[in-house]
Image (cartoon, rainbow, N blue to C red):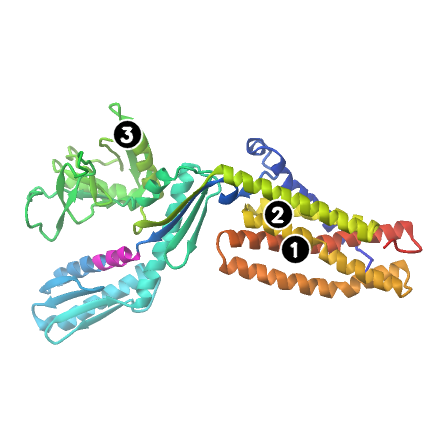
Amino acid sequence: MLHIPRWQTALTVLIILLGIAFAAPNLISRDAAERLPDWLPKQQLSLGLDLQGGSYLLLEVETETVIQDQLNTLVDEVRTRLRNEGIGYSELGIDDREVTFELNDPADADQARSMLREIGAQQARDAFGGMTNPIRVSIDGDGRGTISYTSDAFDERIRNAVEQSIEIVRRRIDETGVREPTIQRQGDARIVVQLPGVTDPERMKDLLGQTARLTFRLVNEDISPQADRIPPGSERLPSDETGPDNEPLQYYVVQRRTMVSGENLTDARPTFQDGQPVVSFTFDSVGAQRFATATRENVRRPFAIVLDDAVISAPVIREPILGGSGVISGNFTTEEVQDLALLLRAGALPAPLTIMEERTVGPGLGADSVEAGQWAAVAAFVLVIGVMLVIYGQFGLWANIALLTNMVLILGALSWLQATLTLPGIAGIVLTLGMAVDANVLIFERIREEARNYRGPVSAVDAGYRRAITTILDANITTLIAAVLLYQFGSGPVRGFAVTLAIGLATSMFTAIMLTRSIMATWLRRRRPQALPI
């Protein structure tokens, strides 16, 4: 047991050196760490919201909007297919999560049913990842029909919408330069956003509260915005400019059909044109082709730029725009064009987000928490060192060396993993300080028992390790299972505690089984003592 192969000793030394290398950047400033050579570790420990202050937002995806958008898309598809097939219909619309219609001639039921099933097959491929039969079609003998999505199809659509929302929220926040934000899903349709260092969340709320769905549509000049009846293929939208009473200054009648959408944008940047702040944009190849076709076929017609159901501007197309780029102008401020460009670059949310909860943690409270955590860690460290020295003497000194190494390895592992250290995480580290010597205590007590049974020093140490190893593994593995479950089913601070606890367990087992055993074996080999100082 005390014969340690050279490769094992080399591995122990390598792990300790790596721990020191990854922990060292935390001793210098962030700017100094960024200037280190690329081949050196430069990751620093990330402090959570409760330690450095910042903002906490709990967002909820409006899933009903996701469902209604999917049903509206289905209505448009059904309308187009029925017209293309020459099938007469009426009363096409949405009724309680179902698309309903009535055939003018019930004899067309079989043809309509076959066509609608083709729509279901196409949506299964395009929107539902190959799901079998996402929609149900029913047409009775009188020609009245209903089309409904299955519950699995709705669940899949909502799940995709939430995942897409998380990714877009992450892009928007990353664009603002916030360091180490925490963005994670909570429940079925909620998103937790923690923004360390952000003490004024208003701009973030504005950025995350906008869907940023950009579309380019033609203005219907044949209908007055004040008309009582708007044709089915058009809708009345307000301008984004409001008067003193917060009412829109103007309304537009625009076609529902989207000529080009923001999904085809590849870039959007704030710039200036004629001394006014504007947003310049660029389309991908598909968007450029659609934009060129739309502008070529509609010269001298107004073209509405619609953002979240509000018309930003409606310029008249003077000539075809063939380059795949353009500008969005309006009565914008410099900050507004910067935010608009950011939103367009990050992409549109699949559904609006509602702010369910908002908290702001001041940096003073975080500083107090850090200071309290530091004092707790130092006090625990000093007390553990003292107890080990008093009870085990020289062996306790080796355990304390292992404890100090353990702290360095924890800090290095947290920095390497870019884990976020929270206040419960500090509690996990303090708890680990006590647990880190548990393995050594078990080993030392076993060695004492063997020495009392008149074993020699080498035999006592060998038997102590051999008989304690099973107990050490059982105790640490069961605690590690608890830490894994806390991380799997917990969230936020609970996860922070679980991460530090799990890392501390792994490093404490390494230092007890590998490091102190190597120190003890080297001491026995060189000193050849007649009795153990324990």
Q: Position of residue 22 (x, y in %)?
A: 63, 42
> Are there few (<14), some (14-19), or many (20+) residues within 10 Å of tag 2?
many
Q: Which mark is residue 129?
A: none
Horizontal and vertical percent position of residue 138: 19, 72
Query: Which residue is label 1 attached to?
Result: 506
Nearer to us in this view, 309 or 49:
49
User: Amino acid type of disc 3?
Assistant: Thr
- Residue visible at 11% across and 65% down? 87
The mark nearer the N terminus, 2 or 3, is 3
Looking at the rendered structure, which numbered label has been put on residue 413? 2
The front one of 376 and 35 is: 376
* Residue 45 visible in rendering: no
Q: Residue furthest bottom?
A: 141
User: In this picture, is 206 found above or below 81?
Assistant: above
Label 2 to label 3, Cα distance in Å? 46 Å
Quarter of the image for residue 186 reads: bottom left
Q: Nearer the viewer, residue 37 or 407?
A: 407
Direction right: furthest residue:
530
Residue 432 visible in the current orientation: yes
Q: Is residue 236 left or right of residue 483?
A: left
Q: Are marks 2 and 1 in contact (CB under 8 Å)?
A: yes
Identify the residue shown where x is 18% and y is 70%.
113
Q: Which sits earlier in the primary sequence, circle 2 or circle 1?
A: 2
SS category of the residue bearing label 2: helix
| Residue that carries the numbered disc 3 in the rendered image | 333
- Ranked by sequence position, the earlier of labels 1 and 3 is 3
Quadrant of the snapshot with the N terminus: bottom right
| Residue stretch rendered in magenta on the structure | 63-72
